[in-house]
Image (cartoon, rainbow, N blue to C red):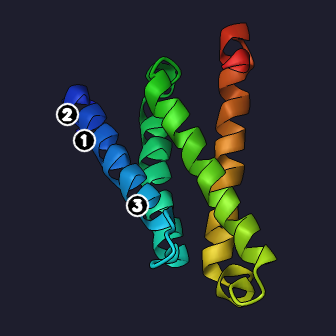
Amino acid sequence: MAKTNKRVVRQTLFLINNYFHNLMLVYASESPDVPANIHATLDAGHDAITAFFTFFSLFEIEACAWWTFNHRAFLEALCIGNVLRETALEPEDRNKVTEGPLLVRAKADIIRMIQIMKVMGEDSEVARER
């Protein structure tokens, strides 16, 4: 479908990313009555950033021009990293994420985002500054 109907694929991935990005933010939000949901935040963040990774793998050249998508994926990587950092600092949460497949997946998402940012910034001063 990526070859026959690029527009539908781009829009679908953009909407998937947007949905899971917002879901990630809801799960990451804390209040005195409701703590952040660590697992749900990381799951939604993974689903959101995976939509960007798919977009980048299918349409690498176009992905470099979709700044909104790029910035949102970068923010997802930051949120994932912040959740991991905060979880490691909290004694009661430390065992929830500090080992196992959730941690491995979260770290892999961050590493992949850094790799993509390096590729995008290689030939563009504007991209490096953004």
- Which residue type carries mark 3? Val
Measured Cα–Cα span from mark 1 to mark 2: 6 Å
Q: Earlier in the sequence, mark 3 or mark 2?
A: 2
Please state which of residues 110 and 84 is positioned toward the viewer in this rendering. Answer: 84
Label number found at residue 26:
3
- 123 vs 105, left or right, is right
- Which residue type carries mark 2? Val
Element assignment for label 2: helix
Q: Are marks 1 and 2 in contact (CB under 8 Å)?
A: yes
Q: Are marks 3 and 2 in contact (CB under 8 Å)?
A: no
- 80 vs 12, left or right, is right
Query: Looking at the picture, does residue 67 appear above or below residue 17?
Result: above
Query: Looking at the picture, does residue 23 appear above or below residue 72?
Result: below
Label number found at residue 12:
1
Picture residue at 66% right of the left edge, 17% below the top: 127
Mark 2, Cα crowd under 10 Å, few <14 / some 14-19 / many 20+, is few
Query: Looking at the picture, does residue 106 appear above or below residue 52?
Result: below
Name the residue tied to disc 2: 8
Picture residue at 65% right of the left edge, 86% below the top: 96
- Which residue type carries mark 1? Thr
In percent of width and height, residue 65 lies at: 48, 17
